[in-house]
Amino acid sequence: MSRNTAFAVLIGVTAVVIAAMFLSPRFPQPLAYHNFADARPWLGIPRFGDVVSNLPFAIVGLWGLIFLRRWTRQCFLDPRERWPYYFVFIGLVLTAFGSSYYHLAPDNARLVWDRLPMTIVFMSLVAALIAERISVRAGVWLLPLLLAIGIASVVQWHLSEVAGHGDLRFYAAVQVYAGLVLLLMLLFPARYTRTSDLAVVVGFYVLAKLLETFDRSIFDNLGHVVSGHTLKHLAGAAAGYWILRMLQRRRPLTPA
């Protein structure tokens, strides 16, 4: 697929997601979302399982940042390609703090701090893949724009809830867009090995969404040992680790 074709496909996907967002009916954040299955405190920490299970996000994020400081040409043909990944791993570290803060006392106000770091991760990964699969210059140029859009989607949702007419469409569209671009990039010519690792990342993300959806069922069926939402955090951190693993093991397909 040529670069011009790749840009055209990317623009087409963007247009479809935007159109679907505006054509969809407005919907608020369901308050029942905050009723997680495992609310047990331990060691003085409320909702211990859902809070402490965020620690792997911080571990993977810090590990990734340390790795990027020691980059070699085996990992990045162009040093500019590192920048989106810096924000991916910074976002993972911030997710550990934001999600922990939210799960200590779940409500819409705290949910903002859970979602903001996650959008940083998603949109930075989109920029990283654009840089690697389409154009380094485009990926780096789009990074701040994509980050701004992701953050704006969370802010817009929060303000709509405060105003009494909650509207999750923008935030949902950003999540869907990030997932579609990640899958789409698998079709574009690769510059590095380990392309299949991106499919694993998508798999962990899908698993995390399923674990979140069946939070209480998993908690009940596993004898109240662990909840689906706690496992969701571990699956999300595993996706972050797989991104790091991909960077550590991949090699360029073209001469450096």
Image: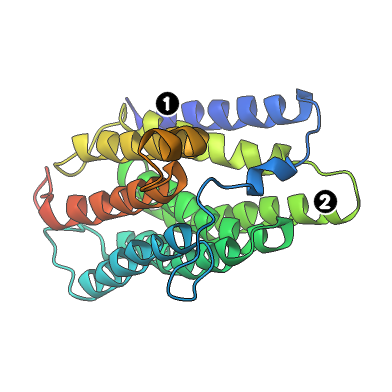
How far is disc 1 from disc 2 in space, using C-alphas?
40 Å
Q: Residues within 10 Å of mark 1 (few under 14, many from 20)?
A: few
Work out whether mark 1 precedes mark 2 in sequence or the reverse, and give the earlier one.
1
Q: Quadrant of the N terminus?
A: top left
Q: Is residue 11 left or right of residue 202?
A: right
Along the line of sight, the residue nearer the viewer: 36 or 15: 36
Q: Secondary structure at mark 2?
A: helix
> Which residue is the site of mark 1?
5
In the displayed orientation, state which residue is furthest to the front: 223
Q: Left or right: 97 with respect to 231?
A: right
- Which label was assigned to residue 161? 2
Residue 10's place in the image compared with 73, above or below, is above
User: Disc 1 residue type?
Assistant: Thr
Q: Amino acid at mark 2?
A: Glu
Residue 33 visible somewhere in the drawing: yes
Look at 57% across and 47% down and name the residue there. Answer: 36
